[in-house]
C-alpha cells in the first residue's frame, strides 16, 4: 500500500511537471510587409485664412503614428497640362505640411499667393515611406534629407530599385 501511494505521488508529480513544461502555442500571426504609398494627384483648393496665409487639410489614412515617428512623408507640387506632372518638391515652392495621424495640413505663406494658389489648379501628391522600409531596403543608402530633395520620378526609381534588389517587396503603391 505504501508503495502504491509513493508510485501515485511520483506519477502525479510527473504529470504536473509535464503539464507545466508543455506549452501549447498557436501562431496565427500574419506578417504584413510595409509598403511605400503615394496619393493620386489632387487639385489644391487652399483657403485664405489671412493676408498671405493659405491652408488645406488633406485626408491621409495611411499616415499613422508609426510613420510619423520613424518614417518620412514627401510632398510634390505639379502643374496640370505638362507632360511631367512632378514639377518639384512642394517645399521648393514654399508649401509646408503639418503632419498628424490621418491628416496632412498644407500651408502657404505669401510666396505661392503670387501664383494665385487658392484657385491655381496646382496639383499636390504625397508619398508615405514607413521607417521599416527606410531601414531594411537599399533606401537605407539615402538620408531623409536626400529623399526630400528628390523629385517624384527619382523617388519612384529608388523605391522600385530597392524592391527589385531586396527579398521583400516594397514597391511604390498608389493609395487609391
Image (tube, grey):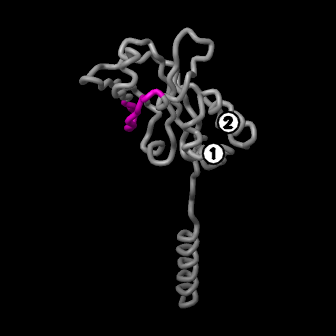
Q: Along the line of sight, which residue is nearer the eye, 51 or 165?
A: 51
Among the 4 quarters of the image, the one containing residue 95: top left
The residue shown at (58%, 43%) is: 30
Q: Residue furthest left?
A: 50
Q: Residue furthest top?
A: 81
Q: CA distance from mark 1 to mark 2?
A: 9 Å
The residue shown at (52%, 29%) is: 89
Contact check, label 1 and label 2, Cβ < 8 Å:
yes
Q: Is residue 98 magenta?
A: yes
- Mark before the other along the chain sequence, 1 or 2: 1
Q: Secondary structure at mark 2?
A: helix
Relative to 118, is 172 on the left or the right? right
Measuring from the top left, give residue 96's x and y in whole percent: 41, 32
Q: Which residues are magenta?
A: 93-105
- Name the mark on residue 164: none
**Chief secondary structure of the magenta span?**
strand
Measuring from the top left, give residue 28's x and y in whole percent: 57, 47
Measuring from the top left, give residue 121's x and y in whole percent: 44, 12
Q: Residue furthest bottom?
A: 2
Q: Secondary structure at mark 1?
A: loop
When the figure is inspected, residue 70 is found, relative to residue 36, above or below; the finding is below
The residue shown at (59%, 45%) is: 134
The residue shown at (70%, 37%) is: 163
When the figure is inspected, residue 80 is found, relative to residue 7, above or below; the finding is above
Q: Quadrant of the N terminus?
A: bottom right
Among the 4 quarters of the image, the one containing residue 11: bottom right
Judging by the rendered image, the residue that carries numbered circle 1 is: 142
Measuring from the top left, give residue 5's x and y in whole percent: 53, 85
Q: Along the line of sight, which residue is nearer the eye, 58 or 89?
A: 89
Q: Is residue 22 magenta?
A: no
Q: Is disc 2 surrounded by few (<14), some (14 to 19) or many (20+) residues within 10 Å?
A: many
Judging by the rendered image, the residue that carries numbered circle 2 is: 158
Amino acid at each position: 500500500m505504501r508503495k502504491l501511494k509513493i508510485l501515485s505521488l511520483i506519477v502525479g508529480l510527473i504529470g504536473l511537471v509535464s503539464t507545466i513544461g508543455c506549452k501549447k502555442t498557436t501562431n496565427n500571426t500574419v506578417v504584413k510587409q510595409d509598403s511605400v504609398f503615394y496619393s493620386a494627384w489632387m487639385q489644391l483648393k487652399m483657403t485664405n485664412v489671412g493676408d498671405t496665409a493659405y491652408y488645406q487639410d488633406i485626408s491621409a489614412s495611411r499616415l499613422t503614428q508609426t510613420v510619423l515617428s520613424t518614417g518620412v512623408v514627401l510632398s510634390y507640387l505639379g502643374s496640370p497640362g505638362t507632360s511631367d506632372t512632378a514639377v518639384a518638391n512642394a517645399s521648393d515652392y514654399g508649401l509646408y505640411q503639418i503632419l498628424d495621424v490621418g491628416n496632412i495640413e498644407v500651408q502657404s505663406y505669401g510666396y505661392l499667393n503670387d501664383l494665385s494658389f487658392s484657385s491655381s489648379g496646382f496639383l499636390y501628391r504625397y508619398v508615405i515611406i514607413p521607417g521599416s522600409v527606410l531601414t531594411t531596403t537599399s533606401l537605407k543608402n539615402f538620408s531623409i534629407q536626400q529623399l526630400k530633395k528628390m523629385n517624384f520620378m527619382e523617388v519612384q526609381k529608388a523605391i522600385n530599385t530597392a524592391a527589385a534588389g531586396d527579398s521583400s517587396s516594397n514597391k511604390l503603391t498608389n493609395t487609391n
